[in-house]
Amino acid sequence: MEIKGDEIRRRMIEHDLLDPGGFVLVGAKITGQLDLSDVVAKKPLVLRDCTTEQPVLLDRAQFSQLDLRGLTAPAVHARGLTVDHNLGLSGARLSAAESIDALHMRIGGSVYLDDGFHAAGSVTLSGSQISAVLMCAGARFQAGLVLVDLRVGDGIFLSQGCDVSGGGIHASVRLRGTRVDGQLIFRDGRVSSPDVALDLRHVRVGKELFLPFDGVEGKAQLEGLTYEGLPRDATLDEWLSFLATRTLRYSTQPWTQLAAAHQAAGHERDVRRIRVAQQRDLRRRGQLSRWGRAWHLIRGVTVGHGYRPGLALVWLAGVLTVSVGVVLISGAVRCSTVEQVGYALNVATPLVKVDATRCTVDAGTAPGQVVLATTWLLQILAWAFATLFVAGFTGLVRRNA
């Protein structure tokens, strides 16, 4: 069956004459261009499994429902399209370099780009509002998916075999500034790019985030991403590795968000792991001066940036051990062995004082001079480690990190 695009436009303009079920066409070949721009028809339009050799134009049109399932066409242009209920493009095959240009749509129900949907060119839904679900399960996008500043009610599903590649100089999937009141799900999907695969900057997810990292092939941008609860489908180890090695640059916010999620779940040990891993990433990729980087390294080694203050006590114990060893080996301290140990503790630690008044150091000999110089240095180190322990234990190091 063949029908002219002008005939479909005429019937939709005269929609008062249509059946309440709207205009329904199945398996037809549409000749000429189907131009429904600015058509206001508060009835359904169903063009199922139809084909056309020219782009379908839907700019600023209004329908109660729009069913284009199985459509074969170069492209769909739908800027400012309004649909009271669902927009269906399940199984559609679009071949143009710009397969879908649908900025600022208003969809009262769901948008279905699933069930074998295939776009050879870019698909753009930026600035649109979708009250229910954006469903892309099982779809293939060869030149990127642009969902910037989208507003979605129930959820976005880039899952169940959804495959997104391309994107040019931008990320394959661009969700920057998007708000999802429900879930954002990448489960069993694939997003790939030789550079940036996923742009989730300033995305707000009202409920859970399902993001298995084995489906992300390329870098990701996560600055400003927020979500409720613990992120799903990836372990904490995978998150720590991903944030440290698969993001474009160091950013505090993704680490803080992950730590806050585990804090809310009562996982204090995991919070400490996240904070320590964050500080390592800061030292490796953050904008620190040479001295700032050196001090950062010292904090990390000695007190774990305030999250492992017990490390400072380990270092302090090491200092005391070295002090005792120097005194005993030198032979320049005149007293019993027990008193030599006490002397070594006295000169090296700010915390413990024992009776070693009978000990004297033969300062006129080289070993005696070594003992004096070494114990002075060890005393400085001991005070430093003791101070770092107190600062780490009280949280002072964390506040200044």
Image (tube, grey):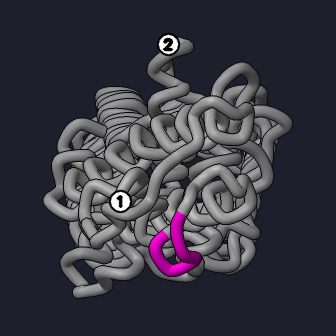
Helix, strand or loop at label 1? It is helix
Q: Is residue 281 left or right of residue 391?
A: right
**Earlier-in-chain disc, 2 versus 1:** 2
Mark 1 sits on what residue? 346
In x, y percent, where is residue 238? 64, 70
Along the viewing direction, whichever of 257 and 323 lies nearer the viewer? 323
Q: Is residue 143 visible?
A: yes
Q: Residue at x 25, y 71 (%)?
A: 228
- Kind of residue indicated by mark 2: Ser
Mark 2 sits on what residue? 289
In x, y percent, where is residue 105? 31, 40
Q: Name the front one of labels 2 and 1.
A: 1
Q: Is residue 49 visible?
A: no
Identify whether 98 is placed above or below 142: above
Query: Which region of the structure is painted magenta?
Result: 335-339
Along the viewing direction, whichever of 62 and 336 lies nearer the viewer? 336
Along the viewing direction, whichever of 236 and 388 lies nearer the viewer? 388
Q: Residue at x 57, y 34 (%)?
A: 363
